[in-house]
Image (cartoon, helix red, strand yellow):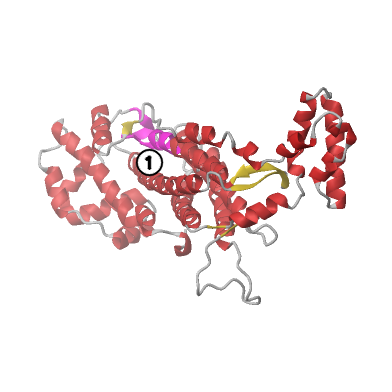
Amino acid sequence: MIERYSRKELKDIWEDYNKYSIWLDIELAAAESMEKLKIIPKGVVKKVKSKAKINVKRILDIESKVKHDVIAFLTSITEKTGKEARYLHKGMTSSDVLDTCFNLQLKQSGNILLKDIDELLKSLKKQAIKHKFTLCIGRSHGIHAEPITFGLKMLTFYQEFLRNRKRLENSIKEISTCAISGAVGTFANIDPRIEKYVAKKLKLQIEPVSTQIIPRDRHAQFFSTLGIIASSIERLAVEIRHLQRTEVLEVEEFFGKKQKGSSAMPHKKNPILSENLTGLARLIRSSVVPALENVALWHERDISHSAVERNIGPDSTTALDFALCRLNNVIKNLNIYPKNMIKNLNITNGIIFSQRILLELTNFGFTREESYKIVQKNAMKSWNENSSFYKNIVTDKKITNKIPVNKLKKLFNFSYHTKKINIIFRRSLKKK
């Protein structure tokens, strides 16, 4: 991922130095277990630890000649540690190191993403509670439907990201496995107790059956989860973009004093952060199909997944980390305009109360079909003539012959639509 969309904490996980450091940790943990099992001489790990140094440049230089990254790594370590290094990698295969490391990097990345979601949840919850009863129009198909509150909007996203957090926790657990099983996964040349020891040392679980690789359905779940989270980010970003349109202007991204919106039009304040989040969501989701296709590998292993994962591992996690942090910043600093929300509630001259009138007519003996026809006729008149829906209703004899005008007036009441908001908030925010 390019620097523009990278944060250091996540990016560092995917740097070569960290990767090779994890490889060394895996090799040393395996050797440590072999010492305990008296498979290799005692003291090997101590000597290797004292002399081993990660030299990224040297490893890459060797790899350019031998065309094998794990061999290049082991050769580099041998150059520093001498003859003791011959006990490293005993009975192991490259995938033992590569897959265990990759899973550990995904776990490390996932834990940072969990923290990002936690911060976003705090911001969403704060805005939801603050605007619990801030009236605004609810829209279906982009068209005014009935009143809701802005707090309820935020609460839907709060709940969605709670679900995302749970999904990510499950996917981290699914990906946190270790395989030290040797060629084609039979343990023919390595004791299964070594795998158990390494897994415990690295705080991973053993892979029950690893062929020669860790099965890629685990990774498919992890990257699919990232894709779902990205879609949730986009849903919220699109909501902000729609609500910031000039003719709506119910919310607006924070705009700095020295910020510029357009090179040509000085008046512009564009929702560039939310638009950027939509783009990043597309990028993150683009990793899902390749991750799913990586599941079907030949027999006990091939490397068709390798190039894919070397790209989607760092790119997807880094992009999602950046996107979650950016979204949190947008939500925390969002300009919210309740007056415009009220203005927009009223621009359709009261037709948003049509269902209330419909239901009341059925209470007074009209069939639902009759009620719908009467209310729709008056609503369309208001729509087409830009006239008051209330006035149309109270001058319709079919209605006033059944329902007194003073009772009809009480039906045009915003509080009717917010009377259950507390119930929704209580069940959504109750401690699990």
Residue 155, percent across and down? Answer: 52, 41
Residue 178 is a magenta residue: yes
Residue 109, percent across and down? Answer: 38, 47
Name which quarter of the figure residue 92 lies in.
Answer: top left
- Image position of 256 with respect to 130: above or below: below
- Out of 290 and 63, give the one closest to the viewer: 290
Name which quarter of the figure residue 421 lies in.
Answer: top right
- Disc 1 marks a residue whose amino acid type is Asn
Name which quarter of the figure residue 203 lies in.
Answer: top left
Q: Residue at (62%, 56%) from the top-left corner?
A: 339
Q: Is residue 397 left or right of residue 123?
A: right
Dot 1 lies on which element?
helix
Q: Which residue is mark 1?
A: 103
Q: Residue at (24%, 28%) from the top-left corner?
A: 193
Residue 394 is a magenta residue: no
Q: Which residues are magenta?
A: 168-186
Q: Residue at (29%, 47%) from the top-left corner?
A: 23
- Image position of 167 with respect to 368: above or below: below
Q: Is residue 404 left or right of residue 423?
A: right
Q: How many marks?
A: 1
